[in-house]
Image (cartoon, rainbow, N blue to C red):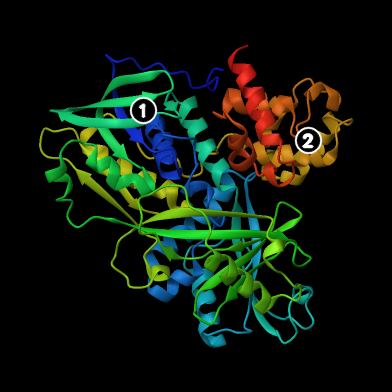
Amino acid sequence: MTGPEQAPDHTTESETVDLLIVGGGINGAGIARDAAGRGLSVLLVEAEDLAQHTSSASTKLIHGGLRYLEYGEFRLVREALIERERLWGMAPHIIWPLRFVLPQLHSPRPAWMVRLGLWLYDHLGGRKKLPATQTIDLARAPQGEGLNPGARKAFVYSDCWVEDSRLVVLNAMDAASRGSTVLTRTRLVAARREGPTWTATLAGSSGTRTVRARALVNAAGPWVEDVIQRTRDPARASNQRDRGVRLIKGSHIVLPRLYPGDHAFLLQNPDRRVVFAIPYEGEFTLIGTTDEAWTGPPGPATISPHETEYLLDTVRRYFARTVGIDDVRWTYSGIRPLYDDHAANASAVTRDYVLDLDAAHGEAPMLSVFGGKITTFRKLAEHALEKLAPHFPMAGPAWTAGAGLPGGDLPNGDFDAFVADLCGEHPALPRTLIRRLARAYGTRAELVLAGARDAADLGRDFGSGLTEAELRYLARHEWAKSGADVLWRRSKMGLHTLPQAEAQIDAFYAGLGHA
């Protein structure tokens, strides 16, 4: 099976690229896209699949972070709020507005404090299109349906939803379309400086190789310190000016739909932490997140019984529907690599990012990324290129603000009109299928549907409309190589298909590899 059509691997062992980026999460993909658009040559390597860990385990929000105001993170909140509408415009197929209901029931904060925070939230970041905060009576408003009795006053504010792992893939696709090489299942074994360049050893499915780069970008997320250790300069690595990463596990549960309506809830708990309840995949409600210190080495994370019960207790506190452990349809957990500001409370650790440039005179630089959040990835990438600018005077200027992502060029930005047009072009296909493909791929849905007059033209159905045509598209354009890549990262179709679908897709891709 070949890689994405637009991203062949042109690098050779004798070639020197400008940037070797380690890490295929949102920060690595965003930096690759920005750098490629400035004319730099880029090689991005990811040890597993794109967005396999932290970047597919978020609460899936493009938001300022209302609760961060409580910790005085005004710069971070302002930057995130400015990015919120900008990112929505860049990818309206995978990002869209969402209204959040914040009940004052069980609130450890007085209403005046919450309202003041929301006033700042409305005005801090130049909101233009999203509606402002309003106050409602839950006993009369439709948003009160499904809640426990007793809730009255609530505030309703705006943020945006994002398909997080798809955002990563779209950045990687755009980087590849601008000349970058993106290699998944490729691990950095070691790297060493040789004057003005890095020499790095990479290991992938076809064996090991050596590459040279003028700069190394360490965007490995939870593995950022591990990559520093692989630079073969441990004495220097231990002298990183008190830079460090603090690993915090966040977990989510997915339940059958708890309430009608397309709004979300921000729920305040007595311990002052907040939990989101969000409509998810049509039939479900997403509940999260937790904040637990992760003390072991970075790796795959799973939810603990304590976290599950904490989230279920939150649901019971606010919603009328009786829920228990048997109602949990799916869970996911991720390790957030936060910059270590030495806060005592895991919930209070800053979500801001720090970029550490290790660049002695005449030596190849290494830029390490500590912390960050998905909403600010584009600004983080801009700041990363600013840090590296003295080493690449030929690089072009910043360009990503407002530059659309693949599939985001919907006519007039009107998603519903685009779906209607696509349905008109394919009248024999189910509207639900077309709408799902439009949400996932935007205008590139036409590549999946090309030439299809009816469902049979799309090939074998692996469940709930996930067809052979879509799997071929994902392998050809989006680096998908397994059932898990498709069902849990390129989509969340794993919630809608039978358990055997993953093995069936694995077998299908294995067959493509031998075709």
Residue 484 position (above or below residue 283): above
Observer-nearest residue: 348 or 116?
348
Q: In this view, does 242 lie to the left or right of 105?
A: left
Occupied quadrant, residue 235: top left
Please tell me whether mark 2 sits on a helix, a strand or a loop.
loop
Q: Nearer the viewer, mark 2 or mark 1?
A: 2
Residue 42: which disc?
A: 1
Residue at x 66%, y 39% (from the top left corner): 440
Q: Could you tell me which quadrant the C terminus lies in?
A: top right
Residue at x 62%, y 23% (from the top left corner): 509
In three-dimensional space, the C-alpha distance between marks 2 and 1, rounded to whole angstroms, equals 36 Å
Q: In this view, does 364 lie to the left or right of 470?
A: left
Residue type of the residue flagged with mark 2: Gly
Residue type of the residue flagged with mark 1: Val
Q: Where is residue 8 in the image (x, y as percent from the top left)?
A: 47, 18
Residue 13 position (above or below residue 394): above
Q: Position of residue 389 (x, y in %)?
A: 26, 38
Please tell me whether mark 1 sits on a helix, a strand or a loop.
strand
Residue 14 position (above or below residue 61): above
Residue 283 position (above or below residue 272): above
Residue 395 shows up from this direction: no
Q: In this view, does 203 lie to the left or right of 156?
A: left
Q: Badge 2 is on which residue?
A: 465
